[in-house]
């Protein structure tokens, strides 16, 4: 499966923010949002899958996963990075991480959600 | 196969602090006048499961019941450590499976039989159906000088024991002397065995912390469908085999899928266990038995 990076949107917001301000303040803000710029990836879930189920990340680039569920409460657990979040219907759950190692890492639903629960997982691929 | 070690050796190993598996139940049976005891742990019977990993899905539990009934040493009691049934999204079917399971195990000759749920039984309805058939999901009992505590880490679908039950546990432990022999039964591991496969309990570390001041604690659990032994400090954690299909060792395969049935070795990797004092050496031992009298394990 594929994912749509939303970095462009974040960058646009940063530029707009800097345009609305003048002088040093504007320049500073633009500079700050450039180096703390997080990649935002939306992940939606439903019984018993994640979409996308494979997420490709670059080592060292901070990322925010915005997790939502289309039906019941779900979990997102990425043990290799000690990251997890409970995904509650009607809400966006944000989990942040800075991938500091290269490889393929499993994430899984850790809230029992039904007959297909044990197959509900995906992977994060971190490249250099 | 029986694992056995005497008390002196156990203390020696424990004192070295190495991650050595000794025997079960350090401190048990060794007090003067301590009665011999023997109980059987059965786990992960997954009644209702159907599929290639066990072509005898409808017969295995009955064979295991017969195997327990024919044990040379009669168990004092029998403990089922969860996943009695295989999960279903249908609440009517869930009750049907629990009912059939109950009916089959009523054939056990030993009449002191205790139950606790696994996530397959309880996580979709917070243990409601389980309780209708088997009563509370966490409780304590005493047997021949050993204090047994049954902990529920599955009725909350997030796999947590939870504040309320941990308070209850802390309160129960308060009444015990630090050297009292304690046995914990639970379904999921209380330590991070392999969270990548959901082999963990979210607040398991907090439970272990509560148990730490007690010198003789042993945990028996299920969930991972294979024998496994692990020490957190002086506390031993012993996973039992399942009685439907075996699972691979943590992380040895890309996904947690059952080990395929081997027609050349039917029932391999499934079975149950006995825990008791060895009358000859006065040591506590774990003995692993095949699922059927015809072989396996
Ligand atoms: Cu389980
Ligand atoms: Fe199980």
Image: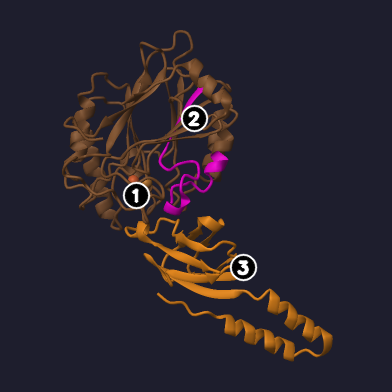
Q: Which one is in front, B115 or A47? A: A47
Q: Rounded to the nearest whole Å, what is the CA distance between mark 3 and mark 1?
A: 39 Å
Q: Name the residue under label 2.
A: B20
Q: Mark 1 points at which residue?
A: B120
Where is residue B258? Give x, y as percent. 29, 50
Is residue B20 positioned above or below A79 on the image? above
Where is residue B144? Give x, y as percent. 42, 17
Image point (43%, 24%), residue name: B23
Image point (47%, 51%), residue name: B195
Where is residue B66? Give x, y as percent. 18, 30
Quadrant showing the C terminus of chain B: top left
- Which disc number belongs to residue A60? 3
Check the image and name the residue furthest to the front: A128
Q: Is mark 3 on a helix, strand or loop?
A: loop
Give the left or right position of residue A109, taking residue B79 as reference: right
Task: Name the colour assigned to chain A in the rendering.
Answer: orange
| Disc 3: residue Cβ within 8 A of ligand 1's nearest atom | no
* Label 2 Cα crowd, 10 Å radius (few <14 / some 14-19 / many 20+): some
Where is residue A93? Give x, y as percent. 55, 67
| Disc 1: residue Cβ within 8 A of ligand 1's nearest atom | yes
Q: Rounded to the nearest whole Å, what is the CA distance between mark 1 and mark 2?
A: 32 Å
Q: Does residue B204 belong to the magenta stretch?
A: yes
Q: Is mark 1 on a helix, strand or loop?
A: helix
Q: Rounded to the nearest whole Å, what is the CA distance between mark 3 and mark 2?
A: 39 Å
Give the left or right position of residue B89, taking residue B156 as reference: left
In brown, which chain?
A: B
Please tell me in which quadrant of the rendered image residue A101 appears.
Answer: bottom right
Chain designation of label 1: B
- Which disc number belongs to residue A124? none
- Residue B275 visible in the displayed image: yes
């Amino acid at each position: 499966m594929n994912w749509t990076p939303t970095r462009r949107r974040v960058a646009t917001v940063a530029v707009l923010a800097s345009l609305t301000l003048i002088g040093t303040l504007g320049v500073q803000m633009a500079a700050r949002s450039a180096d703390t710029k997080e990649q935002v990836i939306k992940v939606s879930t439903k019984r018993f899958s994640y979409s996308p189920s494979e997420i490709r990340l670059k080592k060292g680039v901070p990322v925010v996963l915005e997790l939502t569920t289309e039906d019941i409460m779900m979990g997102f657990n990425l043990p290799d990075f000690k990251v997890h979040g409970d995904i509650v219907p009607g809400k966006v759950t944000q989990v942040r991480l800075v991938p500091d190692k290269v490889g393929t890492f499993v994430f899984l639903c850790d809230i029992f959600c039904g007959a297909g629960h044990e197959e509900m997982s995906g992977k994060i691929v971190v490249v250099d | 196969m029986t694992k056995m070690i005497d008390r002196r050796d156990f203390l020696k190993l424990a004192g070295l602090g190495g991650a050595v598996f000794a025997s079960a139940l350090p401190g048990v049976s060794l007090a003067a006048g301590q009665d011999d005891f023997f109980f059987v742990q059965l786990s992960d019977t997954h009644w209702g499961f159907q599929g290639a990993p066990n072509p005898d899905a409808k017969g295995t539990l009955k064979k295991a019941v017969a195997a327990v009934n024919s044990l040379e040493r009669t168990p004092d009691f029998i403990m089922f450590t969860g996943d009695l049934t295989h999960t279903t999204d249908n609440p009517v079917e869930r009750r049907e499976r629990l009912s059939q399971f109950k009916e089959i195990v009523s054939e056990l000759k030993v009449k002191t039989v205790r139950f606790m749920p696994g996530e397959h039984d309880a996580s979709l309805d917070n243990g409601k159906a389980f309780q209708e058939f088997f009563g509370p999901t966490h409780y304590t009992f005493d047997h021949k000088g050993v204090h047994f505590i049954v902990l529920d880490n599955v009725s909350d679908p997030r796999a947590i024991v939870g504040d309320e039950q941990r308070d209850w546990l802390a309160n129960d432990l308060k009444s015990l002397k630090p050297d009292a022999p304690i046995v914990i039964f639970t379904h999921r591991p209380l330590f991070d065995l392999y969270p990548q496969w959901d082999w963990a309990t979210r607040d398991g570390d907090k439970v272990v912390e509560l148990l730490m001041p007690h010198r003789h604690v042993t945990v028996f659990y299920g969930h991972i469908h294979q024998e496994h032994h692990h020490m957190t400090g002086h506390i031993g954690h012993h996973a039992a085999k399942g009685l439907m299909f075996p699972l691979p060792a943590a992380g040895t395969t890309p996904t947690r899928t059952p080990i395929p049935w081997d027609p050349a070795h039917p029932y391999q990797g499934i079975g149950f266990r006995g825990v008791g004092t060895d009358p000859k050496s006065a040591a506590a031992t774990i003995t692993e038995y095949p699922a059927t009298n015809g072989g396996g394990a």
